[in-house]
Amino acid sequence: MRQPIVFLLASFLVLLAVWQAAAARKESLLLTAEEPGGNVGFYSADGDLLGKVKVGYLPHEIIVTRDGSTAYVSNFGLHDYASPIGYAGYYVSVINVKLQLEERKLFTFPAGAAFGSVQRAPHGIKLSPNEKELWVNCEFFSADGVTVTPQMLVFDLTSDSQAPARTFTFTTGTNKNHNFIFSPNGQTIWLQNGAQGVAPMNPVTGAIGTPFLPAGPGKAVSARGLVFAPDGKLVISGAGEFLIYDVSTNPPTQVKRYFAADWLVNQFLYPSVTPNGKYLIAPSTNGEIFVVDYATGALVKRVPVFALDPVMVTISSDSKTGYATAARGGAITKIDLSNTKFKTESIATGVNAGPNGLVIVDMPRGGIETDREEFRVGAVLSLSGAGQPNGYKIKSALEMWKESVNLAGGIPLSNGDAAEVVVTYYDDFSTASRTNGLLLDVLDDWSPDALIVAETGFAPSAALLDELDDSKVPLVSIYPLATAAKRDEAADEEQLVQHRRQLAAGATVGHDRWVDSVQYSNDYVNRFARNATVIDAQATMAALALETAAFQTGRISGSRYLHAVQDLDTTFFFGSLKFDDETGANQVSGVPVFVNSLIDQ
């Protein structure tokens, strides 16, 4: 009998060694939705900054898939549920964790919808239990309180669509919904509705049950956070108290209430319960983290934080560490939960970075990849001579576009890598007779992946069209093409008028990083301290066409990428885009023009 025992022991030791080696190859990362900064921050568990990815305006919530590969961030666009100051957001950012980039956007509306008629201010986000759907609550009311009211949006993650697959409108008694959670069995969604209490929602039908208002000491409680404890009970953060409910009954039954007069807290926010069930932990509006004995409700510790306005505490799977965010500060507070000293450390996120949501991701050590290929765009512009005023603005618009792509991590490629945008500028000196030769030189000397041209007298030569056909490089013109290769004074004057014309608010909203012309104009003013014009918008539309085709195909060169540019049919912040098969002109506005369409004409 001794040999089998020895064999089993040896096998156990081998398995233990394998498990320990695998664990040693893993590392925990912290991903934060940094509200004022508009970033997703990547940090090691010890506080080292690993990178930042630019997302939308005032992001709040962040969640991650079970395998840690993909994170989702709600770009709320407003500072707080109680103080809705800002510009309500339009989309959820989909983050590739390994590549540190925004690989996709999920918009709260179909492309081309009318401005002022769409859902906005996405806040709470949750994956369905099978991770095939993303649920998002939107909080926007139109000015009339009727045209747009808050809804729950459901995105089908198994499809390529960037728009919601289903929508459910909140009832009058739940239209203050701010967040939600799935029940442990996934059969019910519990809506967190502030002063409207808590209500169940059927995730299949969207039917919303009767809200219940947890009763406080002589007043209704504002439900500002929900979590299911390991014992299956629903914990509600209220006005200076915690209420614990058994939701297996109908209506739910309150089983515990934790409150003490000397806590002196107006409101608790998002609660957490340690996985071992020992502590209930929540931030308070007085700027402290409360650690409460989950079994008894006794206050164990008030833990100060290193920044302003703590929002939530995310707890490690071993219950040993908590990470508290602070939406009006520049630090995460790391809390040691392994003993009753509750020692804290500060993880700097940058001045007023404002970490709001936070998730912990376990991934292979050194798994973050920061190397980038290059997406090479050559731009032939009039940077000297009569066309210089427009040329300078076009260059500015292209630089802002390039920066926005690269700050978001670049372009994800189908081979698992990513590319950063590199734009090189060439001056045709406002002389149309030079433009074709200059484009040919750029193709021959620099081997670009795409080309942009802006010359009012430009008409492609036969030699240029032949070279474009051979190289499979897309060429997009910001201006209409001339009928002959000479300067068109009338066209030149029209472009000068557009150069002076300030960009007006658009009638539609588009599927791009700016969505509407208001956001584009705001970004432009912040970047260049001057107003955007129609010329800027035309240039950005041309660049967005090249970018969108790359995101759709995962390619930045070759026939497949070229055809993706040609086949675009979408709407951007400045209008719709669909290239005519014969002329290459945008069928909606005439510009931009896909020059390659003329090859076979």
Image (cartoon, helix red, strand yellow):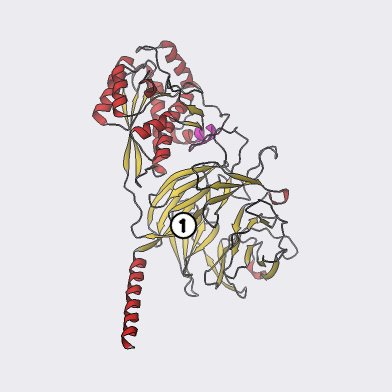
Q: Which residue is mark 1?
A: 331
Vertical placement of residue 341 versus 508, above or below = below
Dot 1, how many residues are within 10 Å of its Cα: few (below 14), some (14-19), or many (20+)?
many
Residue at image point 48% right, 17% down: 497
Q: In the rendering, at what x and y percent does residue 225 appear? A: 61, 59
Residue 539, quarter of picture: top left
Q: Does residue 149 show up magenta in the picture?
A: no
Vertical placement of residue 269 versus 9, above or below = above
Q: In the rendering, at what x and y percent does residue 212 appear? A: 72, 59
Residue 348, quarter of picture: bottom left
* Picture mark count: 1
Give the side of residue 180 with respect to residue 35, left or right.
right
Q: In the rendering, at what x and y percent does residue 99 appear? A: 38, 49
Please name the amino acid that badge 1 sits on: Ala
Nearer-the-camera pick, 180 or 49: 180
Region rendered in magenta: 508-522
Residue at image point 53% right, 67% down: 303
* Residue at the left extreme of this rendering: 445
